[in-house]
Amino acid sequence: MVGARRRTSRRSLRRALISSALAAAATLALAPGAWAHGGDGETKEGYVLVQQALGYLAHDGASGSDAAMEKVDDALATTDQEGVDVALVQQADDALKAGDVGAAQDLLQKSIAAAVSSLKPAVGEDTGTSTVPSDLPGRGPLTRLDWALLAISALIAAIGAGLAVRLRPEDTIRALRARLGESARLTDQAQEVGLR
Amino acid sequence: MTIKAPAVRREHVPADSSQPARRSRVRAVVDVVDERLGITALEYPVPEHANRLSWTLGGITAASLGILIVTGILLVQFYSPVPESANASVRHIVTGVTGGRFIRGIHFWAAQAMYVTALLHLIRVFLTGSYKRPREGNYLIGVAMFGLVTLAIFTGTVLKWDQEGFEALGHNIEIGRLLGGVGLWFSPTFADQVPILVRLYGAHVVIVPGLILVLAVLHGLLVKKHKISPHPSLPSDASGTQAPSDEPTAPFTAHLKRIAVFGMVLFGILGVLAVLWPPTVGAPPVEGLEITRPPWMFWWVFTLENWVGLAGILWGELAFFALLAALPFIDRNPRRAWRQRPVAIAAASILFVIVAVLTTLMAVTPAKQHLGM
């Protein structure tokens, strides 16, 4: 009985493993498919192009310089430069070429001051973005408050873990199984005695 | 010959009010409250196997929800759901409000915990066959709640109003367009004088958690009505749908105590994570860019998007939830032990591996490659 159960278990496990391996292989085989999703298309608005350059710099820092320079070039070449100070954009371009990302961010932000100050309140899916500061990192060095919160959190977790051990169920599943098996055996015996 | 079956170790015995027993003050207070609110109704017996960690995952998910609600209430005091100032208000919470970074960190990590524990609960329900008759309806409620948790994470991602959130919103708007009339609510033209961020804020703080709470109450009531499903490696009663009458029981309040202590452990871990790895705040959004990755639980559908376009997200999610919802109606095998359900286990393993491989592909793909521009 136990042997048969083990065999069934092994067979099930083998089937599950084989089908999983096939699924993984099939999924990977599909992987070289086309990158089908594209962007929203190039905008002609100069201040948006400048914001896009700022977006690359804010998100990627110096490693976003190449993408940002492309956007700056587009901003310099576009026909819609309303509210954009082209001279400042040109200076930002020079700063980027010189590798000074901070100065470029500053100049780009100033170059669109007129455009963003005349924006109407955002509706629908408008971003409402006027300035594009860099990503805010998760944390700096731990403060005294951080240490206190860390200690309190660790204490709460430890107390909880202690209580969880203290309040754990008295029986393991194996013990419960044995207990219920014994109960069933005794009930069967009682029925047999009753029949006699 | 007298043969005695083993006695049930712990059974709830209602307090005998006729005995003038000495009562502690706490007990007296509990009695006063109970007389008015009937809290001892919670002391109904549940089988002992239900007090194991794996059978408490639903309760831990509820504890995560509780933490999310409390921290969410604190966060909305300082959050501005207007596009012009949303990102700045999140930055202010982190840098200008005492303990703000910690509260936001707990909220962020509790959302991850809720997703993970709900998923683990779903896997436990699958492996132990707890979705089988007569619990199919309650299982569907659970699947709906899992969908709502996913939606809550999505709307929460958008509320940060950084590039990641804006790109997530952009995808959602496109998917809404693919859905036609069904996706109208997600369209910015549905209420074109209101920023869509404000409507998603309403969904995040009222509609989605409200629906989760309603369904959670219904879920709990149905668990009480159908009782905890039998453990597949233990005998069941004659109907095969309930634990045997001779399995030891404990009052449901003992189960609640276990949930409370696991909730404590969870809160402590979330606190540690919130201090050591608080979530970042991205730069305010810029239209026309696609340079971020979505939260990890959406990676697998974004790999599909890379392959087949935006429809991949829509059809991937729909297929996933349709499969989950159809499970009790496809799997008619009455057995509960996983070893005796080779077809269901093999099918679930395939699904799991597909999602894991798609997720891994996204994890090793640089974010910019996702653009496909």
Image (cartoon, coloured by chain):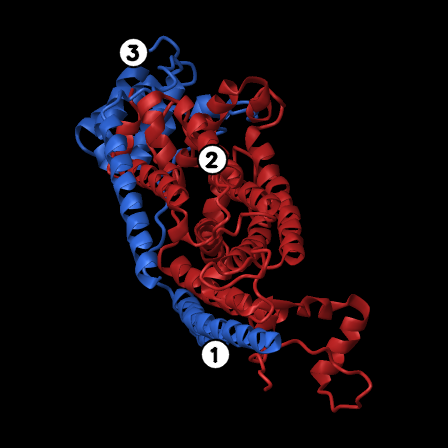
Chain colours: A blue, B red
Left or right of A42 in this view: B101 = right
Q: Are marks 2 and 1 in contact (CB under 8 Å)?
A: no
The quarter of the picture where residue B317 lies is: top left
Callout 2 and callout 1 share a chain: no
Pick the residue in front: A27 or A173.
A173
Instruction: Name the quarter where the C terminus of chain B is drawn.
Output: top left
Q: Nearer the viewer, residue A188 or A148?
A: A188
Labels 1, 3: one chain:
yes
- Residue B119 x, y percent position in the rendering: 45, 49
Give whichever of A12, B48 is nearer the camera: A12
Q: Amino acid at mark 2?
A: Leu
Against A182, is A139 above or below?
A: above
| Residue indicated by mark 1 | A166
Q: Which is in the foreground here, disc 2 or disc 3? A: 2
Q: Residue furthest left?
A: A98
Which residue position is annotated with label 3?
A77
Chain on which label 1 sits: A
Whether marks 2 and 3 lie on the same chain: no
